[in-house]
Image: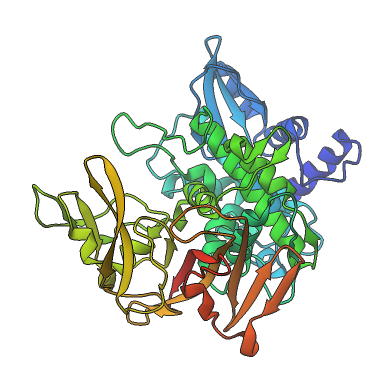
């Protein structure tokens, strides 16, 4: 197979007139590769089968409007004018990852120094295996299961070559962050995205990075488990599931490329990432001007894109007027819990409204993310001392504020839940009014190794906190005078 690959590459370069940028293949280049593989590896059997089945194969092309599109990993298939069409694609995430393989990864793939651009061929072969699946009508529940492995290994795994998708999907299979690197700089209300990325990209927990950089989006279903399954669109415009998949892959590739640039020391604007977000959230741009947006809402969308960020199967007790107490295990993913979910209070039990109580001692998620919000507003999240909070009371349609003593069940700190979880990032909102939403600027704190760094994209600040990187206690309370309040807390399981 190695000699076949060399022959394919030699002829591919000729077809492309000494094409150099092989890591950005378009539809013509993929079509050329397909013909060469069919000729030199399969002796024209794939084309013969295509003609027999009377199907059309296109490469990396836009979808026709108003058609139902299905997918099998990197193959999208649909009917157009009565003809079944297989649209062969390679996601931008795959291209970004294989163009930045480490030496260790190249060794694990069986690649030597002289085997230039075999990486792209290995990615192409993975998708070609899926095309063979469809043409010969072989179906199995696990699209990368035993049958896939058998076909892939039989044709392509000669001389120890591994499936490249499995390699780039392995956790921590990319360059790790260090304390000294570049970052995003402020650009037209970009602080919500800049502060969030500083935590996701550079905090000591690899779980956030792994969920974004090593997830094969092609195998994720964004549909409900109900029958018939339905795509729940998280965007603020009409969109099909396949469009959301493509958007997520663009987002994934852009975030990874920005991350690599910053590891090289670049100070850059979040142009590409925010433009991709804009395709999903039109409201973040108004009349060519970028709007101030919520860091929490942005994280919620990113968690939907990359479900490994979601907390699943967490235990809680459900209380309502009809069902006094019912123990439940959630089967729905949750991107964030509220501060109130964690702090708990007898206020939760007032009135007849239903509420839930999380069993924090038995939660097992690798990460936990908390979002500030809800009424009534409290000031101190870093201790369990009682606090007077204002609760709205209504009498004859007139609202008034009544001060009620809040008894907290637990509180936030650098370590929570019997020290099983460690805070690795915090985002704070400036220019706020206690008890009201809104603010004017986001900054963040990021735990790298065992030291805390303060990040502020205005002024390009990236510096250790006081006392040589000690925990920033100020993130645990709202400051009325300075208008600062915590917005998000990020924890990892120790």
Residue 279 on image: x %, y %: 62, 36
Q: Residue furthest right?
A: 17
The quarter of the rendered structure image containing the C terminus is bottom left
Q: Residue furthest bottom?
A: 467
Question: Which colour assignment does the render follow?
Answer: rainbow
In the visual, does 449 lie left or right of 69? right
Residue 4 on image: x %, y %: 73, 46
**In the rendered image, is residue 316 in sight?**
no
**In the rendered image, is residue 61 in sight?**
yes
Q: Is residue 228 above or below residue 344?
A: above
Q: Give the quadrant of residue 198.
A: bottom right
Residue at the spot x=67%, y=39% of the render? Answer: 41
- Decide which of 158, 208 is in the foreground and name it: 208
- Decide which of 50, 355 is in the foreground and name it: 355
Residue at the spot x=40%, y=37% of the render? Answer: 223
Q: Is residue 128 above or below residue 356?
A: above
In the visual, does 405 lie left or right of 176? left
In the visual, does 1 lie left or right of 412? right
Residue 85 on image: x %, y %: 57, 21
Q: Give the quadrant of residue 249.
A: top right
Q: Is residue 296 above or below residue 379?
A: above
Residue at the spot x=19%, y=56% of the render? Answer: 328
- Decide which of 9, 78 is in the foreground and name it: 78
Numbered disc total? 0
Residue at the spot x=74%, y=55% of the render? Answer: 99
- Decide which of 282, 122 is in the foreground and name it: 282
In the visual, does 284 lie left or right of 137? right
Q: Give the quadrant of residue 327.
A: bottom left
């Amino acid at each position: 197979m190695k000699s076949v690959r060399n022959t394919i590459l030699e002829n591919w370069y000729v077809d492309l007139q000494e094409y150099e940028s092989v890591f950005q293949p378009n539809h013509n280049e993929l079509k050329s590769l397909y013909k060469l593989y069919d000729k030199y590896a399969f002796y024209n059997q794939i084309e013969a089968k295509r003609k027999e089945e009377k199907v059309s194969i296109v490469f990396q092309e836009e979808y026709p409007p108003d058609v139902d599109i299905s997918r099998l990993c990197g193959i999208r298939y649909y009917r157009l004018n009565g003809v079944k069409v297989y649209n062969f694609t390679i996601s931008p995430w795959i291209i970004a990852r294989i163009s930045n393989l480490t030496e260790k990864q190249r060794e694990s793939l069986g690649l030597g120094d002289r085997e230039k651009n075999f990486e792209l061929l290995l990615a192409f072969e993975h998708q070609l295996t899926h095309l063979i699946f469809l043409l010969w009508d072989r179906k199995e529940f696990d699209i990368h299961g035993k049958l896939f492995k058998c076909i892939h290994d039989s044709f392509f795994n000669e001389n120890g070559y591994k499936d490249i998708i499995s390699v780039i999907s392995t956790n921590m299979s990319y360059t790790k962050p260090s304390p000294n690197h570049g970052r995003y700089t402020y650009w037209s209300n970009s602080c919500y995205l800049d502060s969030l990325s500083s935590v996701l990209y550079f905090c000591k927990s690899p779980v956030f990075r792994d969920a974004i950089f090593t997830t094969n989006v092609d195998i994720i279903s964004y549909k409900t488990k109900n029958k018939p399954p339905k795509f729940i669109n998280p965007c603020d415009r009409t969109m099909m599931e396949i469009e959301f998949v493509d958007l997520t892959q663009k987002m994934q590739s852009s975030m990874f490329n920005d991350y690599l640039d910053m590891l090289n020391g670049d100070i850059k604007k979040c142009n590409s990432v925010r433009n991709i977000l804009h395709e999903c959230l039109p409201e973040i741009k108004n009349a060519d001007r970028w709007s101030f947006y919520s860091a929490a809402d942005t994280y919620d969308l990113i968690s939907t894109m990359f479900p490994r960020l979601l907390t699943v199967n967490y235990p809680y007790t459900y209380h309502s007027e009809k069902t006094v107490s019912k123990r439940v295990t959630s089967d729905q993913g949750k991107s964030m819990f509220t501060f109130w979910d964690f702090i708990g209070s007898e206020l939760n039990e007032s009135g007849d409204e239903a509420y839930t109580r999380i069993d924090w001692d038995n939660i097992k998620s690798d990460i936990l993310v908390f979002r500030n919000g809800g009424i009534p507003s409290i000031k101190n999240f870093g201790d369990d001392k009682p606090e007077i909070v204002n609760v709205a009371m209504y009498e004859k349609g007139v609202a008034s504020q009544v001060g009620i003593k809040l008894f907290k069940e637990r509180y936030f700190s650098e370590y929570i839940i019997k020290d099983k979880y460690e805070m690795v990032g915090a985002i704070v909102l400036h220019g706020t009014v206690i008890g009201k939403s809104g603010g004017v600027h986001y900054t963040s704190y990021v735990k790298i190794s065992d030291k805390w760094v303060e990040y502020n994209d205005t002024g390009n600040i990236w510096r250790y906190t006081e006392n040589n990187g000690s925990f920033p206690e100020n993130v645990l309370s709202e400051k009325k005078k300075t208008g600062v309040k915590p917005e998000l807390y990020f924890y990892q399981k120790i």
